[in-house]
Image: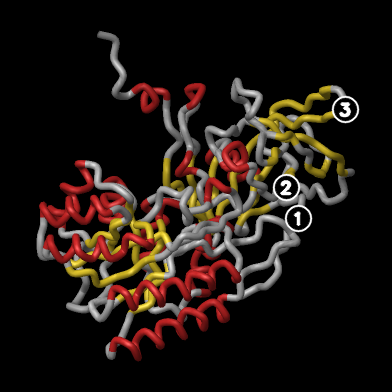
Amino acid sequence: MPTKSTFSTHRTHIAGVPVPELARRFGTPSYIYDAAKIVERVNDLKQFEVVRYAQKACSNIAILDLVRRHGVLVDAVSAGEIRRALAAGYPLHPAKHGDPHPIVYTADIFDRESLSLVVEQDIHCNCGSPDMIDQLGEAAPGREITLRINPGFGHGHSQKTNTGGEQSKHGIWHEQLADALRRADHRGLAVTGLHLHIGSGTDLEHLSQVCGAMERLAREVGRSLTTISAGGGLPVPYRAEQNYVDIDVYYKLWDASRKRLEDAFGHRLTLELEPGRYLVAESGYLVAEIRAVKKMGGNTFYVVDAGFNNLARPILYGAYHPMSICPADGSSAADRPTHDVVIGGPLCESGDIFTQEEGGFVATRKLPAAGVGDYLVIEVAGAYGAVMASNYNSKPLAAEVLIADGNAEPIRARQTFEDLIRGERIP
């Protein structure tokens, strides 16, 4: 796998298909996914026995079907995600006894629908709260469960993506593990899995810290364990100066921890990894059309037809995305002069700015000169893009398109106005 990322401010094609052709066929804004990039990232992780996709990153059933066909299992954080996994062809039960569960429900609560569904369909649960243990045990005693433990520390590219430590709602606090084990025993539940996840966008140093915490906690659980999960958090570069995590080194750290635990328990342990962003982020592009070029004092704005209703990461986290320009005629913008611009969306909100830093501070981006009708491509947008979209300002959800072997096929039709008001009524 590569160690360095490369980005350009000019682009003519996505996965071999001209950007203007995609815009003409599917309209703008549209999410475009490169299937080959997803498969490439799946193959990066082949050392891990079980790769379990955190579908919250991008849950279109065509994406789920793609990773399923390449041997990836799936994680679900809601009843809706369980149903998506089933719609994408995931089976309810392992092919044979001892195989990993095709679908695992991971959450910090059971809402009433999710509890009913996991009981009815016998979905394996990764419990992130002591109350979940009691609720599942009361409804379905005799099951096997996994415990998600908060090890007392976390990390992330933003405080809002930090999933460990006492400021996080996620997981069972590590000092309450003994109580969680007593609850499980009282309810007749066998704890067979342990799961730790400290946050997204972490580096190798922080990811490796989880190994030591896992070993300590696993020894407290004991020999009932058959599976340990390293969680997710594998980052991808969004900036040219950022690197990929060395997957070989990361695997060796986890494999060494797994082997020490196997020696202590006297039986084999399955090692799982739960990537979300890593599998899909780089595959995704949000294609928007520039609809106005405005001078506001010393700033030049490119105002496009995509907003934070399509991609919320910049307004939520001050997230940075690489961007490129494609002229409307499909030529290269490489020879155009570049200048500093602010990229804004169409929403009636001052915060609808794609080039902002955390805290809402407006920033500029050096991009080629462009005019109305040219295209802005927001890159590395496959994770936490379409899944976090909304209908704010009564904007329809964007189309989604998957490119495989040079063929671009719609995998979600653009919402219509009728879709938008479906369910509403005037009494």
Report the residue marked by disc 1.
8
Report the residue marked by disc 2.
324
Q: CA distance from mark 1 to mark 3?
A: 25 Å
Taking the image as drawn, is residue 404 in sight? no
Q: Looking at numbered disc 1 in the image, what kind of residue is underneath it?
A: Ser
User: For the residues carrying marks 3 and 2, which lies nearer the camera in this image?
Assistant: 3
**Residue 426 position in % (x across, y down):** 29, 10
Work out whether residue 253 or residue 95 is closer to the camera in this orientation and state it: 253
**Residue 78 position in % (x across, y down):** 30, 48
The local secondary structure at tag 1 comes to loop
User: For the residues carrying marks 1 and 3, which lies nearer the camera in this image?
Assistant: 3
Residue 307, by quadrant, is: top right
Q: Are marks 1 and 3 in contact (CB under 8 Å)?
A: no
Q: CA distance from mark 2 to mark 1?
A: 7 Å
The local secondary structure at tag 3 comes to loop
Color encoding of the figure: secondary structure
Horizontal side, residue 262 vs residue 187: left or right: right
Taking the image as drawn, is residue 274 in sight? yes
The local secondary structure at tag 2 comes to strand
Work out whether residue 374 or residue 91 is closer to the camera in this orientation and state it: 91
Q: CA distance from mark 3 to mark 2?
A: 22 Å
Q: Residues within 10 Å of mark 1 (few under 14, many from 20)?
A: few
Report the residue marked by disc 3.
298
**Residue 358 position in % (x across, y down):** 66, 41
